[in-house]
Image (cartoon, helix red, strand yellow):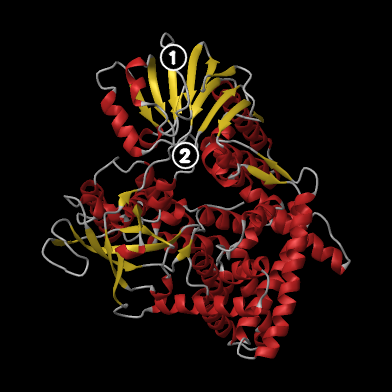
Amino acid sequence: MLKWLPYPMIRIAIFFMAGVLLGIYFPSFVSFKIVTGLLIFCIIGFFALKLYSVENRFPVLLGFLGLSVIFLFGLVRLFLFTDWNNESHLSKIKGEVEAYEAIVRSVPEEKTKSWKIEIEITSAKTSGLPSLKLRQTGWQPATGKFLLYVSKNNFTPDNFHYGDKILVKGAPQEVKHPANPGEFDFKRFLSFKNISHQQFVHPDDVKFIAPATSHGFIYYSHLARAWSMKKINKYVHGDDERAIAIALVLGVTDGIDNDLQNAYAASGAMHVLAVSGMHVGIIYAIILFLLKPLNKYRWSKWVVAIISLILLWAFAFVTGLSPSVLRAVTMFSFIAFARPFGRQTNIYNTLAASVFVLLIINPYLIMSVGFQLSYLAVLGIVYLQRPIYNLWEIENAIGDWVWKITCISIAAQVATFALGLFYFHQFPTYFLISNLFVIPLSTLVLVVGIFLLLISFLSPIASFTAIILEWLIKALNWTVFKTEALPFSLVNNIHITALQCWLLIGILLALILVFEFRSVKWLYASFALTIAFTFLQWNHFFESVDQRHMIVYSINNHQAIEFIDRGQSYFVNDSLLLSDPERIRFHIQPNRLMHGVSKTEFEIPFGASIKGVNYYQWNNKTVAWIADKDYTLPTTASFDLLIVSKNSLRKEEFNNIKANCIILDGSVSKRFVTYLGEQVKSKKISIHSVAKEGAYIF
C-alpha cells in the first residue's frame, strides 16, 4: 500500500485541495486579510526554523508549517481567482447598467432559440446613453464574466471571434437559484466557472466594435477547431455520424441529439463522447508505439518525451483548448515528462503534481465532475487493473486482450462507481460487454478522424477515409443501441446524498484494503460504514419517501401540479409540457427522484371538475384550480389554496375570493402577478408567485 513519506506531491496536493475546498464551502469562515497574515507568518516561521535548524531537529513542526503554507495558499489562490471579490465586479456597480463593452471569450454555441456566447465585461455605462452609436460620459471600468444569449432571428455569429470587442445594450441579470426542489443548480455550476450573470438580447442590441487587438494562442486554437469541424462536416455524411465524429475527435458534443446521448449513457459508453483522459491516453499510447524504434538509442528517452509533449499539445490546440482536453493533456504531459527519469518518479506523485498545477491555474476545477471522474478513473486503473489482471492468466492472445479491456473497465468503474450514482443517478449494468466493443471502435474512430484531418487537402483519399470513418461510427452506434435495448440495461432513479457518496467511497476503499493488508479490521470498517449508509437511506425513506405533499412547479409558460403520496404521483399539467420530456426531466424528475416516485398517474381520484373549477381534497385541505376564464366560483365556498393559471382569475371575482393563499403558476404573466398583488393588498390573502418565489410546496 502507499506509504506517506515517499510521495511529497500527494501531501502538497491534498493540503492545497483542502484549502480550496474550505474557501468554496465556507467562504466567510475567515477574512482574506487574516488568511494572508497567517500565510506570511507561516512562511516566515518555516524559513526561520529551516535556517535555525540546519540538521532538521524539528521535523514535525517544520512539516506542520510547510503544509500550513500550502493549505493557506489554497485559500488565498481561490480568493484571488474569484472574480466577484474584485471591487470593480459587475455585481458591485452602483446604479442600473444601461449598456456595456465586453470581449468575446468563447466560440458561439447554438441553442434551440439563441446563440450562447461567453463574454467578459470591460466597462459599463450606468446613465445617459441615448444611442448605442454614441459613447458619452457615464462609463466606468467593470470586470466579470457572464453568458450572453442572442436571439437567432436575423443573427449569425460568424463574425464574432475570440477576443473581439462588442457593445451590448441592457443590463445582465444575476443567475437565479433553482426554482424547483432538487433541480440542477445552474447558478452554482456557473459560479465554478467564475460566471455570475446572464442576459438575453435581440440582435439589434449587440454591436461589433473592433476585432481582437492581439491574436493570441487561444484565438488561433479556436480557428483551428473551426477549420477541423468544417472539414469533418464536408467529408462525413449523416447527422449522427458527423456529431459523433466531432465529439470523439474534437470534444464538441453540441450536435448529439438526446436519444443518441441517452443510448450511450444506458450502455455505459458515455465516457467516449467527450475528449478526456481515455482519448488523450490512446493518442499518447499511439505516439509511444510509433516512436518505439528510437528506444534502442541512449538519447531516445528525452527525444520521445519532447516529441510526445509537442504532439499532445498540438492535439489540444486543434480541439480548441477546451477545459476537458487541457485537463487530460496536462495530466499526460506530466506522465510523459516523468518517463525519462525512470525509477526516480512515481505515477501517484506525477498525478498529484498535475493536480496541483491544474488547481493553481484554476482552483474551481476541483468541483468539475469531469476532473473528479478523470482522476479517479486513472487512479483506479493504475492501482487496480494489474492486481485484477493477475487473477486470471490467459495464454490465448485474443482472450488476453479481452481480459485486459475487461480489467480496465472494472478498475475504472470501481473507482468512479460512487460518483456516478451521485451525479447521474444511474448504473449501466452491461458496461463490461459494451466496453469490449466501444473502446476499440472509439479508438479507431479517433485515429481515423485525426488521419482524415491530416490528409483533408487530398480530396479523393479524404473521401475514402471518411467512408471508413462513417462505417466505424455506424458500428459504434449500432453497438450502443443494441446494448441499450437489452433487458435491465440501466438501473436508474438512484438517489444518494453527498455524505452517502463519501460513505460508498469509504466502503469500497476499505474492501480494497482488506485484500491489500489481509487484515480483518478493514472488513470491520467497511461493515461499520455500510451500517451508516443504511441508516441514512432509511432516514431518507421516512423523511422524504414515506410522506405526502403537493407541489406547484415553477416552469415558465407551463402548468404543472403534482400530488405525491408515498411514491405514487398524481400529475396535473398542460399538453405541451407533457410532450416536452426534456423540461420534465430538468424541472420535475429531480423532485420525483428525491421522493422515490415509482409510478405517475394522470387521472386524479380525489379530484372533481365543477363549472370550470377543478377541486382536490388533499391532506384535509381543499385545493381549487382555475385554468381558464370560463368558470364559476361559488359565492359561499372557501378554499385553503387557490391555484391560478393563464391569468384566468377575473377582476370581478376579487371581492368574492375566500382562500388562505393564492398560488400563481408558471403560465401567469409578470404583469398579472403585479396587478393581482395590488388588488388583494387589503384582503388577508397571501399570494405566492412561482415565477418570483419558486415552486410552492404544501
Count of number-bearing discs:
2
Q: Residues within 10 Å of mark 1 (few under 14, many from 20)?
A: some
Question: Residue 57, can we see it?
Answer: no
Q: Quadrant of residue 443?
A: bottom right
**x%, y% of residue 529?**
60, 32
Q: Residue at x 38, y 72 (%)?
A: 160
Question: Residue 270, can we see it?
Answer: yes
**x%, y% of residue 501?**
56, 39
**Which amino acid type corresponds to the residue marked 1 in the rendered image?**
Phe
**Which amino acid type corresponds to the residue marked 2 in the rendered image?**
Ile
Q: Residue at x 14, y 56 (%)?
A: 127
Numbered badge on residue 639: 1
In the foreground, 612 or 684 = 612
Numbered badge on residue 551: none
Secondary structure category for the residue under label 1:
strand
Q: Residues within 10 Å of mark 2 (few under 14, many from 20)?
A: many
Residue picked out by circle 2: 555
Q: Are marks 1 and 2 in contact (CB under 8 Å)?
A: no
Q: Is residue 609 above or below residue 35?
A: above
In the foreground, 329 or 121 = 121
Q: Looking at this rendering, what residue extends furthest in the top direction? A: 636
Q: Is residue 136 left or right of residue 290?
A: left
Q: Is residue 83 left or right of residue 609?
A: left
Q: Is residue 569 above or below residue 590?
A: above
Q: Looking at this rendering, what residue extends furthest in the left direction? A: 137
